[in-house]
Amino acid sequence: MSEIKLTAERRTQFGKGAARKLRRAHQIPAVIYGHGTEPVHVALPGHATMLALKTANALLSIELEGNSTLVLAKDVQRDPIKPVIEHIDLVVVRRGEKVNVEVPVHVEGDAGPDTLVTLDLQTLELAVEATHIPERVVVSVEGLEAGTQILAAAVELPEGAELVTDPEALVVNVTAQVSAEALEEELAEAEAEVGIEHEESAAEVQTEEAAEATESTEG
């Protein structure tokens, strides 16, 4: 994964008012920390930063006052309503060191006929080099039959990556596809168990009444 360069400005004012002022100026308040360094409070360019963070585990090179620092976004606080980032915690990383990151799982291929593929684990936690973070982990389900389960330990990892997630965690589950008729039958059985009875439709009632009237006339 290539580095994404962002030019930052040092922050000297703090508090909610200062943060709102920054966001109005299309900037994002952030703090850089880690590796025993003193926390550095900065303002990042809003649009460029939002674009950068659309990539999972984006490696950022923060340019500040002539110096460059490699960081990963540790915590991104977003507005619950507006598409706005309120604050970012950035952790310093070094070239060659390993970091633990959550990497998205991508399923590819077509499982066997009449099967349903469920992705039970959206991400895997991996220990990888900070400058070689994979964008995703690929799991193939090509031709797999119903009843197949892929655990974390069985997932092929990128070179140099180590699994941190529980090896026994279920990642992909391949089950038999249930037909609409079977679903209706299961629903009916479940309703019967709890004593739910459906009322007769108007058409059914009319049919029964007509049948009873015919029987009375014939009699």
Image: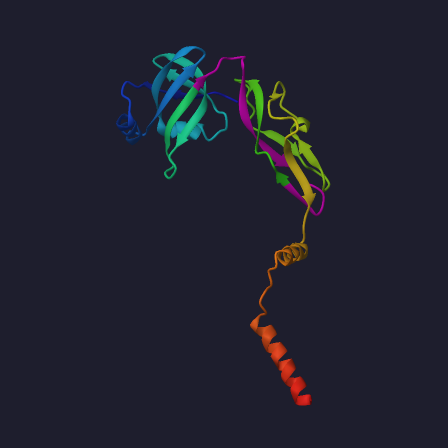
Q: Residue at x 57, y 34 (%)?
A: 122
Q: Position of residue 127 (x, y in %)?
A: 57, 20
Locate residue 61, reporting x and y percent: 43, 18
- When asked about the image quadrant of residue 184, the answer is bottom right
**Residue 213 falls in image quadrant:** bottom right
Looking at the picture, tell me which residue is in the foreground, 189 or 125.
Answer: 189
Q: Quadrant of the C terminus?
A: bottom right
Q: Is residue 207 above or below residue 174?
A: below
Q: Which residues lie in the magenta part?
A: 91-117
108 vs 169, nearest the viewer: 169
Question: At 49% from the left edge and 13% from the top edge, which residue is drawn?
Answer: 94
Residue 109: tell me if it is visible.
no
Q: Residue at x 67, y 31 (%)?
A: 151
Tell me residue 59's x, y (percent): 48, 21
Front residue (pair 100, 169): 169
Question: Residue 132 placed where, x, y %?
Answer: 55, 19
Measured along the vertical axis of the image, is residue 3 above or below residue 117?
above
